[in-house]
């Protein structure tokens, strides 16, 4: 029998899921809830942080995607997640790459592969996810906001595919060959709390760390992935699973530096910063809230089905 409560996450590249919701995934997996991750690309265009693996880069041997396939398998083991899928199968859609706009957000790269996810037909890509939704029958789906957090084209495309697939999957007359219709009760966009981010930055700066999240002022403007607290709906306290999240991040040495900002935040601020993950509800009815005005569980208010 499938777990009574089932969560589906839709992410663009390996490592995105751990950065955004790794602690929640570990918590729910440990509690016996269903956790399914769909990754849309293998991150073939990613920057490689390990010099001895530089030969895997897209402009050299172009084997980074296969390497990151192994990294995400290790990360899922660290989180205790056993159901991971590639959208349409491994290699169906390729990482689109990106470049930085002068205003500090990501935009599509100048040269994009013919099979880039950014170029994917929306209905074709969504149909692959419709099939997963109808098979897994999740009550909750998590993905990016409409800007993909910071503008990465694959994050934006993952958002579009996820939102469209939720709509299509619920239509009984749509593509009956993809399974029986299923309406996802609650859809959340991952977020980062403005108050928590500012508090974490202050603690980092007070501890003498001026390099982590360089350029971010605790009292100044923050990047678009930081969300005002008034827009948040849910805060999942998975502090007990922070070490699993950090172990999962360590499984991505080509992408995440152990002396980078996330590890600095964990070392200086602790579980409160890395173990409490927040969300915006964009479909469905909020469940009961705590004293902070937020749900403490993505499944809050739902009847098991």
Image (tube, helix red, strand yellow):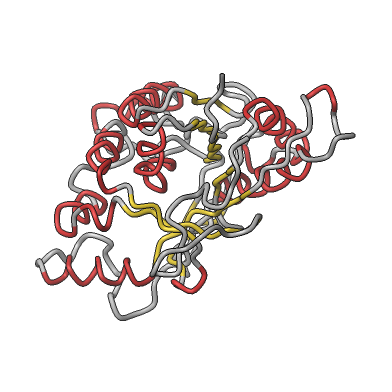
Q: How far from the left and from the top, in percent, is residue 31?
A: 38, 33
Answer with the quarter of the image where residue 286 lies: bottom right
Q: How far from the left and from the top, in percent, is residue 106?
A: 50, 57
Q: Going by the picture, which residue comes out furthest to the bottom?
A: 219
- Residue 268 appears left or right of 69: left
- Tell me the residue at 27%/36% (across/down): 244
Total numbered badges shown on the rendered structure = 0
Q: Going by the picture, which residue comes out furthest to the right?
A: 173
Q: Nearer the viewer, residue 117 or 195?
A: 195
Q: Is residue 276 above or below residue 198?
A: above
- Residue 56 appears left or right of 111: left
- Tell me the residue at 37%/46% (across/down): 19
Q: How far from the left and from the top, in percent, is residue 267?
A: 15, 52
Q: Quadrant of the N terminus?
A: top right
Answer with the quarter of the image where residue 212 lies: bottom left
Q: Going by the picture, which residue comes out furthest to the left?
A: 208
Q: Nearer the viewer, residue 238 or 92?
A: 238
Q: Is residue 150 above or below residue 61?
A: below
Q: Quadrant of the C terminus?
A: top right
Q: How far from the left and from the top, in percent, is residue 142?
A: 54, 46
- Tell me the residue at 29%/31% (across/down): 251
Q: Nearer the viewer, residue 266 or 241?
A: 241
């Amino acid at each position: 029998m499938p777990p009574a409560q089932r969560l589906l996450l839709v992410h663009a590249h390996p490592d995105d899921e751990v950065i955004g919701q790794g602690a929640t995934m570990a918590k729910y997996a440990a509690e016996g809830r269903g956790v399914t991750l769909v990754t849309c690309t293998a991150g073939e265009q990613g920057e490689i942080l390990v010099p001895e693996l530089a030969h895997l880069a897209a402009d050299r041997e172009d084997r980074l995607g296969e390497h990151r396939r192994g990294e995400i398998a290790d990360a899922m083991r660290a989180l205790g997640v056993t159901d991971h899928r590639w959208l349409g199968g491994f290699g169906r859609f390729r990482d689109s790459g990106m470049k930085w706009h002068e205003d500090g957000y990501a935009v599509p790269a100048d040269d994009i592969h013919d099979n880039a996810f950014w170029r994917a037909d929306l209905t074709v890509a969504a149909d692959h996810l419709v099939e997963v939704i109808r098979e897994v029958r999740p009550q909750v789906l998590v993905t990016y906001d409409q800007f993909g957090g910071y503008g990465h084209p694959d994050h934006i495309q993952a958002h579009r595919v996820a939102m469209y697939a939720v709509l299509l999957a619920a239509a009984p007359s749509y593509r009956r060959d993809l399974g029986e219709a299923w309406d996802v009760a609650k859809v959340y966009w991952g977020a980062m709390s403005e108050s928590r981010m500012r508090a974490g930055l202050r603690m980092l700066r007070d501890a003498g760390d001026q390099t982590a999240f360089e350029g971010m002022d605790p009292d100044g403007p923050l990047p678009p992935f930081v969300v005002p607290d008034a827009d948040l709906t849910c805060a999942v306290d998975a502090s007990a699973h922070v070490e699993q999240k950090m172990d999962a991040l360590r499984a991505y040495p080509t992408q995440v530096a152990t002396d980078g900002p996330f590890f600095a935040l964990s070392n200086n601020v602790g579980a409160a910063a890395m173990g409490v993950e927040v969300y915006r509800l964009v479909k469905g009815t909020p469940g009961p809230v705590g004293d902070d005005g937020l749900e403490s569980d993505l499944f809050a208010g739902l009847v098991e089905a």
